[in-house]
Amino acid sequence: MDDTRNLEEKLAYYQKENEELKLRVEELSDFFENASMPLHWVDAQGIIIWANQAELDALGYSKQEYIGFPIGNFHADQHVIEDILNRLVNNETLYDYTARLKCKDGSIKHVLINSNVMRKDGKFMHTRCFTRDITGKVQEEQRKNDFVTMVSHELKTPLTVINSYVQILINKAKKDADNSSGQLLTRIEAQTKKMIAMVQDFLTPARIEGGKIELRKEAFVLDTLINETAQYAKLLTSKHSINLIADESISVEADRDKIGQILINLLTNAIKYSPKGGAITIGYEKHDEKVRVFVSDQGIGIDKSHHKRLFERFFRVNNELKEVSGFGIGLYLVSEILRLHGSRINLQSEANVGSTFYFDLETLN
Ligand code: ADP
């Protein structure tokens, strides 16, 4: 009798446990199926094996049109999905990886992907992929950029005209031996050039991103360009000493204007971010087949924690120099122009000690 009761109690207990378990499973599957964030799993062959409703709704496909198909079919950029799958196979976890997905109606969605792989006994089972739609943000950014580009275009012409009139006046002052006017005009010229360089900085990213930028490579003597830029920097500051370190004369093949734009950006930053003055050095040294060009300062420096993001567009270090104007575009441009040259910008910097920015170019001699 007791045995039967025990058995009944046990049965009732297991039934209750079972129901609890079923409830938890239902809750969990509801959590994933009906979560407001798009989610999917992809197997080791890159085939979508599960996707939730939010993902289907976001892209406009039915289950039958989406599950069972290669994930690559829904990506706008094949090299991107190849890279994503490669990284996942190699055990990487992706954080906010940007990608573009193809919707059923032909439109494109910009997304951030967070993903890693579920493994069993080391075997790739499936990815756990979370997708966040950032199309609105990207479009807003695009509108902002278009506006900045348009304004910059409008500013460029009058500034160039002002600059040419100032040059005429400088020549006239020279002829008339009018030194005081000459000095003032030279300062006006420097500030106008600064504005032209700024406008140029705003125009270049849009052109780079639109794939519209073409390097106009030519052979030129690096020393002359460095010397010219240093002379120009001297006009921008009376607080700093601008020093030149030049090795033997070196010729390079690169886009002279754009390398000049890089040097001006680095020098203006060196001035801006060393408010107490000090020495700023621009120079180059030969390294085997290459030449290393550098700009260093004794300014506020940059803490290591910021080095990684420094070359992103609109990134500015939140330092104590809030009054220093800028848009966080200069270093982004520097790195993009160097990327087009097959080179890259490097940095050695320590907070409160100073910074050295440097890059390599192929030499001709
Ligand atoms: P901007 O100067 O317009 O802010 P940049 O892209 O040229 O934009 O620079 C990004 C950020 O990097 C700056 O806001 C500044 O915080 C930091 N930075 C750049 N150059 C220097 C430098 N020489 N010394 C210290 N900080 C620098």
Image (cartoon, rainbow, N blue to C red):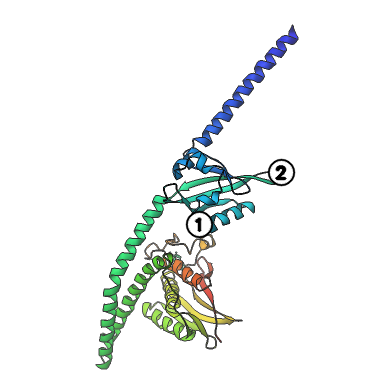
x, y percent for residue 197: 36, 73
Horizontal side of residue 327 vs 113, given as left or right: left
Determine crowd level at label 1: few under 14, some 14-19, many 20+ residues with C-alpha closer than 10 A: some
Q: Amino acid at mark 1?
A: Asp
Beta carbon of the mark 2 residue lies under 8 A of ligand 1: no
Q: Secondary structure at mark 2?
A: loop
Beta carbon of the mark 1 residue lies under 8 A of ligand 1: no
Nearest to the observer: residue 312 or residue 56: 56
Question: In which quadrant will I find the N terminus?
Answer: top right
Q: Which residue is mark 1?
A: 77
x, y percent for residue 262: 45, 74
Horizontal side of residue 146 vs 359, given as left or right: left
Where is 79 relative to 196, above or below? above
Q: Amino acid at mark 2?
A: Asp
x, y percent for residue 347: 53, 69
Q: Residue at x 52, y 40 (%)?
A: 64
Horizontal side of residue 165 vs 225, given as left or right: left
Where is 99 relative to 6, above or below? below
Residue lying furthest top? 1
Q: Which mark is residue 100?
A: none
Q: In this rendering, does residue 235 appear at all?
A: yes
Residue lying furthest front? 64
Q: Residue at x 53, y 68 (%)?
A: 349
Q: Secondary structure at mark 1?
A: loop
Q: State the separation of the CA atoms marked 1 and 2.
A: 32 Å
Question: In which quadrant will I find the C terminus?
Answer: bottom right
| For discs 1 and 2, the disc positioned in front in the rendered view | 1
Q: In this rendering, does residue 37 appear at all?
A: no
Q: Which residue is mark 2?
A: 121
- Whereabouts is ligand 1, in terms of quadrant? bottom left
Nearest to the observer: residue 342 or residue 71: 71
